[in-house]
Image (cartoon, grey):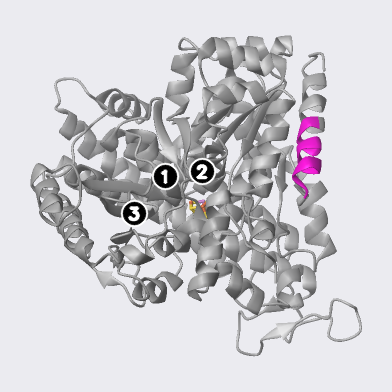
Amino acid sequence: GKNVYEKSVDPATRAMLLEADRAGIETAWDRFEKQQPQCGFGQLGVCCRNCNMGPCRIDPFGEGADKGVCGATADIIVARNLLRMIAAGAAAHSDHARDAVLAFKKMAEGKAQSYQIKDEAKLNALASEYNISTEDRSPEEVAFDLANILLSEFGKQTGPIQFTRRAPAKRQKVWEAAGIDPRGVDREIVECMHRTHIGVDNDPVHILLHGLRTSISDGWGGSMIATDVQDVLFGTPTPVVSESNLGVLKEDEVNIIVHGHEPILSEMIVAAAEDPDMIALAKKMGAKGISVAGMCCTGNEVLMRHGVATAGNFLQQELAVITGAVEAMVVDVQCIMPALGNLSGCYHTKFISTSPKADFPGAVRMEYHEEKALETAREIIKTAVENYPNRDRARVNIPKEKSACMVGFSAEAILGALGGTPQPLIDAIVSGAVKGVGAVVGCNNPKVQHDYGHVNLVRELIKNDVLVVTTGCNAIACAKAGLLRPEAAKEAGSGLRAVCESLGVPPVLHMGSCVDISRILVLAAALANHLGVDISDLPAAGAAPEWMSEKAVSIGAYVVASGVYTVLGTVPPVLGSSEVTNVLTKGVGGVVGATFAVEPDPFKAADLMIDHIQEKRKGLGLKS
Ligand code: NFS
């Protein structure tokens, strides 16, 4: 197998992988190795299990079966499978959004006392977007109306979804012309499942167009709703300084990790951890205090809003437990490895699952409901604190690595830093000091060296004066590599460096969790509208160097559907169909003005993005 150096570029990760070996503990990397060789049919996307005449698979070498029992070709099977991935990803983001809105509604009704309206200005801005009157009404009354109208976006039968109107008018026309302007969030997802049932939609292009429509209902629908409601409830992020990597775990404090995606609970955990009674209890148990750290996107949510340190990204979740210093791993939904159950059993860590939707083997269930949010959070903290005496000192091994980071760059914060208008950024782009914007996002994947693609792609972009905006596990990789510090401007080209130094910001701006890619869309729309062009005209490109989740597939689709060329670092399961591959890498450009590319080498991926940015600069009449 690979050695720890080949597995990750992150020193803390390498240290913990060595520790895992010493302790005889398996991780995702070991399980990945046991899966080798992975199924070639699956990799190409040519197996179909959508009905019980199958499973069917197409022979990629053209010698065996070239059709499934129903007659579906490789093109049909690959397209259908991709559509189901988009459906699952859009469902995950949008169902998260639904729960955020339901919590928001309960707050408005006075049924969820733990929550308040933290950003009234944003509440009012959203109300005016929806023509909800704010005059002579309490914020809660406004919030109640807003909650109901946001909830209706999910079940709408005819469009438009209101937030899609935030896209430039030209973009909306593109969607209408292609017949991919979404009608309702749930409707599009349900239709994916219907179309991919045996004997329904069997035209690959027609299937893929519905994939774009569904993904738009995620990016400009579900994800955007999640971001905005969470901002109203918990505050819109503003720049804040924090720390990242496993070194944020404390030798002498109760360590609680919040992992998953929904800030609805993690916000309460962060609040409850500051309760003097809880801190007193921790001291009674022999700890110096209580320390909360984040993981994955729920970590990003509390990092962005409160500067709560992040312990790491997706592939580090098991490693956190292996430090032997985590009293509780508290999870909600998404990107949580079921392996954590067994693993926690080998340590003193309590693996606590909280979502009514997500149970795990080996987890202690402490189900969480909005009505009693803070109460449940307190119980969880108490469980963690009381677990502190069970920590086995001999097995504690916290890597020392941690890096400072400046985070909290919501679209509002970025525009604020620019003086309330995108004009200074546009000026910098026009002058060529900043060549363009690169959006780098997405997961970790043991198929590739952990964080290698993330960090190298971003470094290469900033070196070439491309301002980077980041979310998700890429943002955490950048934080750990020191790229989210204002001093990282030294690694940027001279033009970008000067711009960052004058503003005191890093060359890589952390915009949040994966649902917060909606913030990137809002920023792109602001730039395009200010210039009077479409998003597809902007000198901008996207990338997901280490993606793995179905959510990432939906994201890739809506970023392309929004007009942004996107480079994937791991190969999607579509190569079994030359038609689907051609549509994604070429044909879709004629429909939405952007395409996908696949390039595992981050240096070559950066070149592709920079070339694209230069081409768009030329289109706008800007010098290269
Ligand atoms: Ni995005 Fe966040 Fe990470 Fe990937 Fe998972 S945590 S929602 S899906 S793995 S970036």
Q: Which residues are magenta?
A: 601-610
Q: Earlier in the sequence, mark 1 or mark 2?
A: 1
Amino acid on which disc 3 is placed: Ile
Asked if disc 1 and disc 2 are in contact, CB closer than 8 Å, the reply is yes
Counting from the top left corner in percent of width and height, residue 504 is at 50, 15
Q: Earlier in the sequence, mark 2 or mark 3?
A: 3
The front one of 285 and 52 is: 285
Reading the image, the residue beneath label 2 is 476
Q: Is mark 2 within 8 Å of ligand 1?
A: yes
Label 1: few (<14), some or many (≥20) within 10 Å? many
Counting from the top left corner in percent of width and height, residue 548 is at 60, 59
Q: Residue 310 shows which numbered tag?
A: 1
Q: Circle 2 — which element?
A: helix
Query: Which of the 4 quarters of the picture holds residue 304?
Result: top left
Reading the image, the residue beneath label 3 is 257
**Does the image show residue 560?**
no
Residue at mark 3 to residue at mark 1: CA–CA distance:
9 Å
- Is residue 415 positioned above or below 115 on the image? above
